């Protein structure tokens, strides 16, 4: 089994990785950290990555490689070397909800760990919520790590 941590382009993703690493250690599982770039928003998401302090040089040509490189750097910044030894990384392109659910199934995830921000009901209705979709539609236990609101 594995613990799956799904991260976005937010500083709060460091916290998601740390919590997921603690779970992986507790269960003696592998930690798979994944980042999904939505196909229709590839350029916008890459720009968001580049705006994070220390990530301005993100620039691999293939989008899934780009996402994996982002994950690798986030893991290196979040965990010590001993913790990193049990980590696998993956980058994907597609609809985040679908990619996260299918990855969880592929690795037989014990838990899915995701970040969540406070949003008003109107904000969720207008903009949707990957976190909400994963919580409602996952057949795996989901742990939501509260992350700072980026607005």
Image (spheres, rainbow, N blue to C red):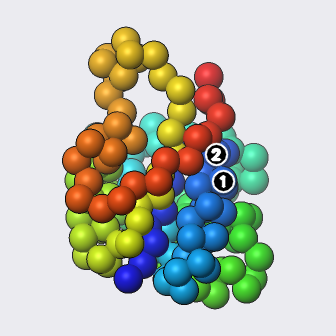
* Few, some or many residues within 10 Å of mark 2 (<14, 14–19, 20+): some
Displayed quadrant of residue 90: bottom left
In this rendering, the answer to whether 71 lies above or below 46 is: below
Displayed quadrant of residue 126: top left
Residue receiving disc 2: 12
Asked whether the residues under the numbered discs 1 and 2 touch, taking CB atoms below 8 Å apart as contact, a structural biologist would say yes
Under circle 1, the secondary element is helix
Q: Nearer the viewer, residue 98 or 40?
A: 98
The residue sitting at 38% across, 72% down in the picture is: 110
Q: Is residue 16 left or right of residue 105?
A: right
The residue sitting at 71% across, 64% down in the picture is: 78
| Quarter the C terminus occupies | top right
- Residue 87: percent from left, percent from top: 56, 80
In this rendering, the answer to whether 81 lies above or below 147 is: below
Residue receiving disc 1: 15
The residue sitting at 38% across, 16% down in the picture is: 121
- Count of residue discs: 2
Q: For residue 109, say whether it is visible.
A: yes
Q: Is residue 114 left or right of residue 56?
A: left
- Residue 47: percent from left, percent from top: 54, 41
The residue sitting at 49% across, 68% down in the picture is: 33
| Quarter the N terminus occupies | bottom left
């Amino acid at each position: 089994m594995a613990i799956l941590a799904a991260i976005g382009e937010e500083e709060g993703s460091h916290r998601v990785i740390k919590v997921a690493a603690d779970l992986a250690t507790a269960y003696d599982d592998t930690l798979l950290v994944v980042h999904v770039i939505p196909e229709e928003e590839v350029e916008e998401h890459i720009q968001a990555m580049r705006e994070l302090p220390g990530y301005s040089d993100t620039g691999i040509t293939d989008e899934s490689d780009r996402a994996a490189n982002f994950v690798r750097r986030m893991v290196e910044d979040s965990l010590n070397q001993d913790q990193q030894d049990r980590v696998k990384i993956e980058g994907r392109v597609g609809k985040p909800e679908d990619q996260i659910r299918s990855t969880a199934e592929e690795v037989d995830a014990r838990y899915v760990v995701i970040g969540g921000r406070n949003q008003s009901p109107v904000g969720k209705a207008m903009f949707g919520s990957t976190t909400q979709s994963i919580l409602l539609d996952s057949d795996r236990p989901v742990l939501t790590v509260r992350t700072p609101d980026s607005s």
